[in-house]
Image: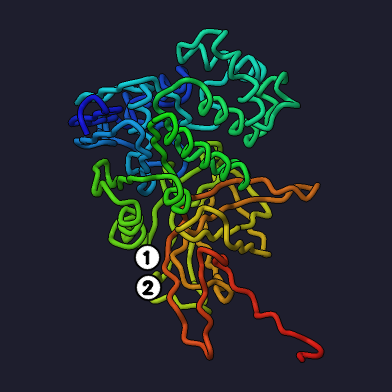
Amino acid sequence: MSDNNLAIKIERIRKQYRLGVIGGGTLKGDLQSWWARKRGKEDPNVRIGSKIYKKNEKFLALDGINLTIYEGERLGIIGHNGAGKSTLLKLLSRVTAPTEGEIKVNGRISSMLEVGTGFNPELTGRENIYLNGAILGMTRAEVSEKIDDIIEFSECSNFIDTPVKRYSSGMYVKLAFAVAAHLDSEIMIMDEVLAVGDMAFQTKCLEKMKEVSTSEGRTILYVSHNMNTIRTLCDRCIVLSKGKIIYDGNVNKAIDIYLSKGLDKELIRDHYEFDDNYRHLDWNSSDLRIQELELNNYGIKCGNKIPLKLKVQSKEKNENVRFRFEFSPMVSPKKAATMVTEERVNFAENELKELSFELDTSHLVPSRYQVDVVAFVTDEYGKDCQLEGVFPGFVFDMNEKQIDNPMLWKTHNWGAVRLNDVKLKGDKE
């Protein structure tokens, strides 16, 4: 293709961060941390289990990225947590600037980097549609021409004049995607936000993105851990690892590299240590920390039990803590199975415990699984309150076990959990 068809051109992009310099969340916290370091004291704002960085220690999020994207392409971007996917999209969306290199963009960009990006929570849904249009450089009249289609697509017509701060996360995504898909932008950037919506709406969004790419020539950049949606939407895919592009080309080959050929092998190991990159942002203030996980991660077969150990530290007193293990096949982020401990664990103040578990895999079918580990308590009304979670806690391959008369199981069609076969009762004639 000629340069006239270029949508994005990225040349020698590097993005470097200085770690541990600021980030207390408030000016007071940053001053406290600075003063403690000056006196050689322990940082009072460091969370349990967090790494204490040396002065001016640096982290290279992107390392020499070169990428050319043409108009109308639907580019998938995949890689494990911390590979640099979100950093790349933030640079393209001009949320932050590169340390080195140059980015050329031909056209307006609409971005959904997280749920509710660009929304003012105090404004209504209708007002936020006009606000997003204005950000893209559209006039009020231009937005008014499209607003009925946006509201209809979003399925939020009953709440369109309600402040969006009262919307659920699913409603946020529906309205935000409807705005991004219908307003006049040449490039759409999506970062794993569709996972919040229901399955019907996800399908509707994927079809809409394919439609606008084909009929209107829009360029789409799509980040997801759901390999099925990558296959459905994208016509090209790149694989990121440690800030570098290790593959650029065919979608199925990219997914194969991501799932099977080395990228995830660094995730499959016997010992895991967890920093804040593994945690949900909303849970970083918890006083309970899952610090380490150990297991024998090789040769796991269907029906075998998985013994594992967790090191958990609690800064404050916590009682009746339970643990939940959520299994997802790597081909899809949807939960396939959940295991919950019945036993409760009590923690004293500043207590570190090593807990042993045994996970029963008898109903799982052969696949590669990600297991998220969540610590929670149940309140007096029966509601579960999350204290801590690591995503993923660990990754493992479930191998086939020889059984009598095995039936071919299509994991991607039938699911990753196989229950007992159904027996026909009564007259079989």
Q: Quadrant of residue 141?
A: top right
Relative to the observer, which residue lies in front, 427 or 23? 427
User: Horizontal and vertical percent for residue 418?
Assistant: 59, 73
Total residue callouts: 2
Q: Which amino acid does label 2 sit on?
A: Tyr
Q: Which residue is drawn at 45% across and 58% down?
A: 330
Q: Nearer the viewer, mark 2 or mark 1?
A: 2
Q: Which amino acid does label 1 sit on?
A: Asp
2 and 1 marks in contact (CB < 8 Å): yes
Q: Does residue 330 show up?
A: yes
In this view, 189 is above or below 425 = above
Q: Residue at x 43, y 29 (%)?
A: 216
Q: Can you say which quadrant of the picture contains the N terminus?
A: top left
Q: Which residue is drawn at 25% across and 23% down?
A: 104
Question: Is 402 left or right of 4, judged from the image as shown?
Answer: right
In this view, 92 is above or below 359 = above
Label whose residue precedes the other's in the sequence (2 or 1): 1
* SS at circle 2: loop
Q: Which residue is drawn at 31% across and 53% down?
A: 254
- Which residue is labeled 1 in the image? 270
- Which residue is labeled 2 in the image? 298
User: Horizontal and vertical percent for residue 377?
Assistant: 67, 50
